[in-house]
């Protein structure tokens, strides 16, 4: 879905399709370098990371495996609840694996710090994080994010997998949701 289709629902573009793909190519090149000669399992966090996973995995120039988890930390609004629930668990055993979590966005960081600890407790050899977007609040939680696409201001954004009440995930660009949409 193009920007025109959402009209005044959004107020400004944070990342264009070109900016997304060139930044993701850079992250993929870094991943290629860092994991050279090592096995690599990408774990996508549903549903927001679907686009990021599709693009990042295709930009990586080596074999990888993919698995998916679904966790919930948000209700239906725009504020983090801090409560994490597993909605869908991994299909595979990650004992001894090098895991790279692929996320859409780190806001409070609560979801990721919980997820990282959870995967480490299953005996993974390494657990690192790749997020396309990171908000300033992420600095408040002790979570080491190895790969960050874009550091953005603390606004609520949609598109490229990111939703507001399950909509806008298919918006091709990433944009700030207009406050009149939720206030
Ligand atoms: P955290 O636990 O506060 O870091 O929240 C992480 C999750 O909240 C992300 O995986 C998103 O699903 C959701 N989220 C946080 N900020 C935004 C946003 O600006 N737009 C859409 N979803 C968001
Ligand atoms: Mg979400």
Image (tube, rainbow, N blue to C red):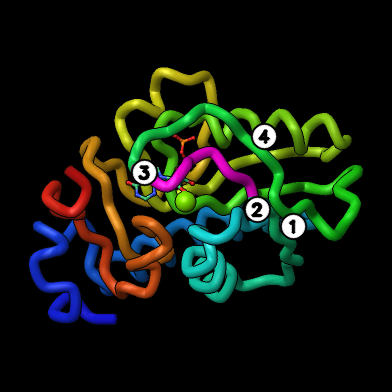
- Kindly report the distance in space between the C-alpha atoms of the residues bearing marks 1 and 3: 32 Å
Q: Residue at x 52, y 51 (%)?
A: 103
Report the front residue among 3 and 34: 3
Q: Residue at x 66, y 39 (%)?
A: 85
- Give the side of residue 21 with respect to residue 97, left or right: left
The residue to which callout 3 is attached is 77
Q: Quadrant of residue 14?
A: bottom left
Q: Is residue 8 above or below residue 123?
A: below
| Residue 74 forms part of the magenta stretch | yes
Question: Which numbered disc, 1 or 3, marks the residue that appears first in the sequence?
Answer: 1
Q: Secondary structure at mark 4?
A: helix
Q: Is residue 116 above or below residue 131?
A: above
| Residue 10 forms part of the magenta stretch | no
Question: Which numbered disc, 4 or 2, marks the residue that appears first in the sequence?
Answer: 2
The residue to which callout 2 is attached is 70
Numbered range of the magenta stretch: 71-77
């Amino acid at each position: 879905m193009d920007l025109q289709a959402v009209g005044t629902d959004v107020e400004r573009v944070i990342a264009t399709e070109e900016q997304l793909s060139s930044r993701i190519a850079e992250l993929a090149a870094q991943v290629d370098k860092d994991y050279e000669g090592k096995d690599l399992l990408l774990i996508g966090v549903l549903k927001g990371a679907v686009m990021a996973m599709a693009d990042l995995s295709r930009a990586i120039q080596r074999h990888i495996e993919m698995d998916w988890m679904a966790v919930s930390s948000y209700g239906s609004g725009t504020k983090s609840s801090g409560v994490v629930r597993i909605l869908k668990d991994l299909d595979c055993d990650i004992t001894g694996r090098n895991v790279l979590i692929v996320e859409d966005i780190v806001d409070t960081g609560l979801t990721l710090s919980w997820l990282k600890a959870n995967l480490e407790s299953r005996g993974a050899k390494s657990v690192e994080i790749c997020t396309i977007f990171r908000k300033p609040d992420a600095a408040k939680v002790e979570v080491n994010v190895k790969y960050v696409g874009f550091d953005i201001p603390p606004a609520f954004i949609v598109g490229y997998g990111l939703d507001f009440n399950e909509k806008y995930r298919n918006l091709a660009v990433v944009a700030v949701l207009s406050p009149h949409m939720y206030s």
